[in-house]
Amino acid sequence: MNRDDQVLRVFWVALLMSFMVVMVTQLNSCSNAPTTVSTKKSYTFKWNDPEIVGKKSYRWKNMSADIKKNNRAYSDFLVEQIKTSGLLEANIKDMKDFGYKPGMDKIQFWGNLLVETMFWESGWNKDTKYGESFKDGKGQQVVSRGMFQISIESSNDRNRSDCRLKHYSELHDAKKNIWCGVRVFSWYVKDSGVIRGRVNRRWKGAARYFSVYRGTLDYTKTALAALRKAND
């Protein structure tokens, strides 16, 4: 066999081996492929629902440009916070009072309620702040901030939300506020076992922290009625 024949033979052997390697790889890939394709469910909440937006005339005139642009991203982020909040596993006695029905998707339920809560607290405005009528442990006026209207002191309560924020300005970051707000909301609800309650004149559940769940003033009465219909 001359040199040219040897080179040609080596070429064909190499080509055949490469073809066999490709075929084996493809067969292994097929055998290891899942039999079902999992898809991530996308949840839609009522950031832009005409009925809710119409309520804004009660206190807010215009939906913020931030919400118009980012409500999809905020919805996805909110879903992730709900999943890790413990609300899905908790036994909350009065969910039906806020529209829960047997078999309902609990992520959708809590998402609707939390989005509605943010609406009545801040009009979904991450820049909103409100000076409360009481003082913090250092004698300073408490200022509620952002989407959930939470204060830096309560957000860093080690026994409850434990958000460990370094500066109040972080509460005006929409995602940080949603993250911390869900922690605050879920702690109070899980601790009491109810979304809203009152025993011996003491508020229980979310009403311990969020005044929109109390219904004691004209504004909070309107808010509470809307919260009860958040899942209609």
Image (cartoon, grey):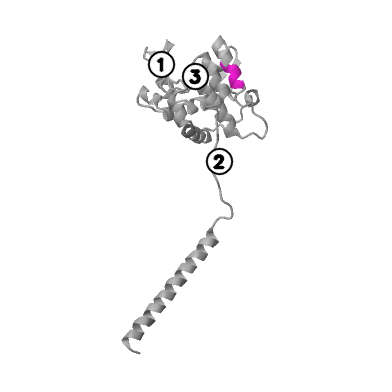
Pointer 2 or 1: first along the chain: 2
- Residue 56 or residue 190, whichever sits in front: 56
User: Residue 220, image x and y in percent?
Assistant: 55, 14
State whether residue 23 appears in this view. yes
Q: Main secondary structure of the magenta part?
A: helix
Camera-side residue of 146 and 168: 146
Circle nearer the viewer, 2 or 1? 2
The part of the chain drawn in magenta is 223-228
Dividing the image into 4 quarters, which one contains the N terminus?
Answer: bottom left
- Report the Cα–Cα distance between label 2 and label 3: 28 Å
Q: Which residue has dot 3 on it?
A: 121
**Considering the numbered disc 3 on the image, is that residue within a helix, a strand or a loop?**
helix
Q: What element carries label 1?
A: strand
| Amino acid identity at mark 1 | Val
Up the image or down, 103 lies above or below 158; here it is below
Amino acid identity at mark 2: Lys
Q: Which mark is residue 41?
A: 2
Pinpoint residue 38: horizontal percent, then vertical percent: 56, 48
Decide if residue 174 is on the left or right side of residue 210: left
**SS class, disc 2:** loop
From the viewer's side, name the closer residue of 116 and 71: 71
Q: How far apart are marks 2 and 1 (CA)?
A: 37 Å
Q: Which mark is residue 77?
A: none
Disc 3 residue type (three-letter): Glu
Location of residue 102 with respect to 171 vertically, above or below: below
- N-terminal of the two: label 2 or label 3? 2
Q: Between disc 1 and disc 3, whose residue precedes?
A: 3
Give the image location of residue 109, x and y in percent: 59, 30
